Image (tube, helix red, strand yellow):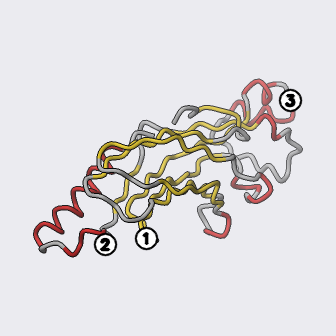
């Protein structure tokens, strides 16, 4: 990710690198999803998606830029604090990898310090701030993505070369997924 610490309203910019070990008949779909609330997926926002292909055998790379989530679609009590963004990849509508990053949304420290009515939140960073009860300048909202510790989940799916003999097919599927995971540099 090229901009892990930024204003909340700035786009997310990833450099995605992956390796393909077998020719693919179709494109790979990549999505970036912002988890708006831990209590319900109805607040998740798909920030962007793109189709990448044709995908040649070898190392492939592209830049993926997605707009920031819409403030008004996030519950006010979930706007600040820790959440998650998910970078997913699917082939033939089957998700084969999900890379999750923790995101900390916070108010700019200088802004907080300029607001005497918010001093208790400056003094105690662990005290939750309910933005629904306080008039805030949301342009002062910042985000920090913890890019050094992604959570990677792999899913076995049916690839184009599944018709090969069983041993080769299983090895190929595992190798493509493993290589995709190890080669992701976002």
Label 3 residue SS: helix
Dot placed on the residue nearer the N-terminal end, 1 or 3 = 1
Q: Which mark is residue 158?
A: 2
Q: Between tags 1 and 3, which lies in front?
A: 1
Residue at 39% in and 58% down: 97
Label total for image: 3
Q: Which residue is mark 3?
A: 116
Of helix, strand and loop, which one carries label 1? loop
Name, please, the residue furthest toward the right. Answer: 135
Q: Residues within 10 Å of mark 3 (few under 14, many from 20)?
A: few
Residue 108 circle label: none
Q: Is residue 59 left or right of residue 66?
A: left
In the rendered image, residue 182, in percent from the top left (x then y), is placed at 30, 45
Q: Residue at x 55, y 51 (%)?
A: 85
Quarter of the image holding residue 23? Answer: bottom left
**In this orientation, which residue lies closer to the viewer: 184 or 9?**
184
The quarter holding residue 13 reads top right
- The reply to whether dot 2 and dot 3 touch (C-beta < 8 Å) is no
The mark nearer the N terminus, 1 or 2, is 1
- The CA distance from mark 1 to mark 2 is 9 Å
Whole-number angstrom distance, CA of label 2 to CA of label 3? 58 Å
What residue sits right under mark 1 in the picture?
A: 92
Would you say the residues marked 1 and 2 are in contact, meaning their CB atoms lie under 8 Å apart? yes
Viewer-side residue, 166 vs 115: 166
């Amino acid at each position: 990710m090229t901009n892990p610490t930024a204003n909340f309203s700035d786009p997310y910019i990833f450099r995605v690198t992956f390796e393909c070990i077998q020719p693919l008949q179709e494109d790979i779909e990549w999505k970036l999803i912002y988890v708006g609330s831990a209590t319900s997926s109805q607040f998740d926002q798909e920030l962007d998606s793109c189709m990448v292909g044709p995908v040649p055998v070898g190392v492939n790379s592209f830049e993926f830029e997605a707009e920031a989530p819409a403030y008004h679609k996030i519950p006010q009590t979930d706007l600040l604090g820790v959440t998650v963004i998910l970078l997913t990849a699917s082939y033939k509508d089957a998700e084969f990898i999900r890379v999750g990053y923790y995101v900390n949304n916070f108010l700019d420290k200088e802004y907080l310090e300029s607001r005497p009515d918010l001093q208790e939140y400056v003094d105690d960073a662990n005290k939750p701030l309910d933005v629904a009860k306080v008039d805030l300048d949301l342009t002062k909202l910042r985000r920090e993505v913890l890019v050094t510790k992604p959570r990677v989940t792999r899913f076995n799916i049916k690839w184009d070369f599944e018709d090969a003999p069983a041993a080769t097919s299983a090895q190929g599927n595992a190798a493509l997924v493993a290589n995709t995971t190890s080669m992701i540099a976002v």
